[in-house]
Image: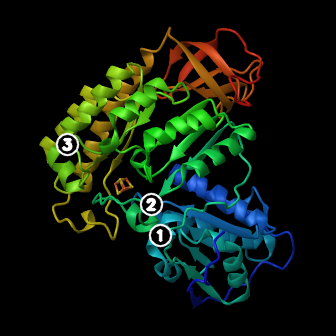
Amino acid sequence: MRGRKRSPVTATASPHLRYPPKMPRTFHIETYGCQMNVLDSDVVGGILERAGYAPASDPLSADVVLLNTCAVRGGAETRVLNRLEAIHGESRKRRGSEALLGLMGCVAQAQGEELVARAPFLDLVVGTDRYSELPRLLEEALHRPGALVDTTPDPEMTYEGEPRVEPRGVTGFVSVARGCDMSCTFCIVPRTRGPERSRRPDDVIREVRRLAGRGVCEVTLLGQKVNAYRNGDVRFAELLRSVAQGGGVDRIRFTSPHPLWVSDDLIRTMKETPQVCPGLHLPLQSGSESVLKRMKRGYSPSRFLNSVADLRASMPEIGLTTDIIVGFPGETDADHEATLEMLREIRFDSAFMFAYSPRPGTAAAEMSDTVSAEAAQARLREVIDTQEKIGRQRNRAQIGRGSTVLIEGPSKKRPDEMFGRTPENRSVVLPGDGLEAGSVVDVRIVDAYAHTLRAEPLAHPAPTSIGDAPC
Ligand code: SF4
């Protein structure tokens, strides 16, 4: 942790009872949104454990409850405040005293003080660059009557050297960069996460090795536009090669790549580096040239198609998924048809599909030619139907094929079965007999559903290490 002057904080009055002084105090974090938030929750958990707090699995019994929020979709503030209010009421009944309730993440950073005005039960609002200060902020919030708000930006913060909770499985996340310098007109992230800053390659590799030493077999490298990573002369493809060489894990993924930075070097590195999985979540957002321009995405549909063609020419079996926003301001029927046409042409394996919702503080929120909610919902239905049909067809085409699955653990729906992923990032369930998390299994795909494949192992492997990794 870097030595810094105490940051400015603000306080507003609220007559709260606080949790009774005792040690160890307990904390519970609920995480919403993207993988970066999952990673941040692990960092915050590590910081609180180092400060003497113990994790609690039940929010209603914890002394401190933090909601790590996502501001990407509309209505997020209302949802998290409703959730926090429910915890507030229930935990007071159960404990006889109030837990200290806080918001962190992108909603906290974007809304700050306004949240306290809307939610008098809120004790703490902490911004995305302030997590290292949490032990001190919690103490202050505990000992003063007002809610505490600290969203001071720190454009250099990367949480380098901060602890993390121990990995909970055989997969893990490592951030390579924070923040974003793009200005996509629908996106609140540059405001909530600040300018882009990258970590040194050595620090990234050290963290991957640390996870590998604790049983992690697969890491996902994270950044808002991860493939735009640059630290000094080191660009993303070189970082990937270095992590493959020195990280000690069997599988490497990365998300989210930006279509503008799908370089020849990156494609070659994906093809030639066995640890780098041939799966990519490449956000298209819209198939219309004019909508992409208004979104300020920086690429055209034809450029996106060329990138997909290059990826598939090099890795014919690559798994491709995407994000689609329908009903962006000014989107016409013809624009919508262009998106459907792109989906039919590219044939993604799956997609996250949303109706546009304005985020206050973004350029798109000021655009006037909005699409009605009814029209946006109808378009969303059409996009979902089109993509789901394609996804099912692509999944069914896997039946009879062989693959290699990294077992992540028991299936959530049927605990007697195991769940894992193929290198292309396809979800697979298979009989659990004799398999453990971390096993790598050769399988044959025997059935396919909308979002999952069913497989049979070709032979049960011993759940021991493969390659040099400790899996
Ligand atoms: S690249 Fe665009 S969509 Fe992605 S985080 Fe940056 S501004 Fe948001």
Q: Is residue 374 left or right of residue 195?
A: left
**Other-residue count near label 3 (Cα within 10 Å), few / some / many at <14 / 14–19 / ≥20:** many
Q: Quadrant where the N terminus lies? A: bottom right
Name the one closer to the observer, 50 or 155.
155
Q: Give the alpha-carbon distance from disc 3 to disc 1, as whole Å.
A: 31 Å
Is 66 located above or below residue 325 in the figure?
Answer: below
Kind of residue at disc 3: Ser
Q: Quadrant where the C terminus lies? A: top right
Return the disc, 3 or 1, that comes first in the chain's sequence: 1
Contact check, label 2 and label 1, Cβ < 8 Å: yes
Residue at x 39% of width, y 68% of height:
191
Relative image position of residue 332 (x, y in whole percent): 14, 48
**Other-residue count near label 1 (Cα within 10 Å), few / some / many at <14 / 14–19 / ≥20:** some
Name the one closer to the observer, 324 or 220.
220
Relative image position of residue 302 (x, y in whole percent): 19, 35
Disc number for residue 155: 1
Residue at x 74% of width, y 49% of height:
166
Q: Nearer the viewer, mark 2 or mark 1?
A: 1
Q: Give the alpha-carbon distance from disc 2 to disc 1, as whole Å.
A: 8 Å
Residue at x 62% of width, y 84% of height:
6
Question: Would you name the residue on which mark 2 appears?
Answer: 179
Is 355 located above or below residue 69 in the figure?
Answer: above
Question: Would you name the residue on which mark 3 appears?
Answer: 300
Q: Can residue 410 be seen?
A: no
Kind of residue at disc 1: Pro
**Other-residue count near label 2 (Cα within 10 Å), few / some / many at <14 / 14–19 / ≥20:** many
Return the disc, 2 or 1, that comes first in the chain's sequence: 1
> Which element is circle 1 on?
loop
Return the disc, 2 or 3, that comes first in the chain's sequence: 2
Ligand 1: give its quadrant. bottom left
